[in-house]
Amino acid sequence: MKKSLITVLCAGCFYFAFSQEDYNPPRHVRESFQKEYPQSQPGQWNHSSTGWSVNFDDRDHNNGEVIANFDSRGRHIDTHVPYDNNDVPAPVMDHVRSRYPGSDQYNVTRIDRSDGKGVYQFQLRHQKKSRTLYLDENGQQRDFHDRHY
């Protein structure tokens, strides 16, 4: 009985210790967030094999609710900003409408990258197939490999 109780207690401690890791990034990641977004407060942090991500209300750039991604060293990789279809630049929408006629339901996310080469991610259904495409602000399709999703 004593052995079982100790085993359960140890298992509970291990579970608690490892489950907290997802919500507490290392100090250098938190400092990088505060440097990039000094007026914003981080929401829930998540950890993955590619680094750390955090949901928050971006008060620094008036982007509303966003997800920022940081690598394991604390470098800011990119920020994903959900977009309303009405806010997407005309050249971007023109490209999608001409290339995928009849597809009028889009999920659009602007991905602001730390290198300044942002893209618009479109997730749409066309001819009964799901598609994801990336376009720059001029409506030109770009190769982009989103490491986070």
Image (cartoon, grey):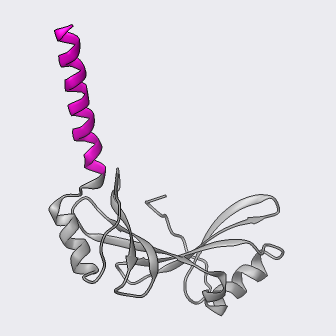
Picture coordinates of residue 98, whole percent (x, y): 78, 82
> Is residue 102 on the magenta stretch?
no
| Left-right relation of 64 to 1 | right
Q: Main secondary structure of the magenta part?
A: helix
The part of the image, by quadrant, that contains residue 9 is top left
| Left-right relation of 20 to 59 | left
The part of the image, by quadrant, that contains residue 84 is bottom right
Q: Nearer the viewer, residue 74 or 64?
A: 64
Picture coordinates of residue 20, whole percent (x, y): 26, 47
| Left-right relation of 109 to 41 | right
Picture coordinates of residue 68, whole percent (x, y): 37, 70
Q: Residue at x 17, y 10 (%)?
A: 2
> Is residue 2 on the magenta stretch?
yes
- Using the image, determine if residue 56 lies above or below residue 58: above
Locate the N terminus by quadrant. Answer: top left
The part of the image, by quadrant, that contains residue 122 is bottom right
Q: From which residue to which does the magenta span run?
A: 1-22
Q: Residue at x 25, y 69 (%)?
A: 75
Q: Residue furthest bottom?
A: 90
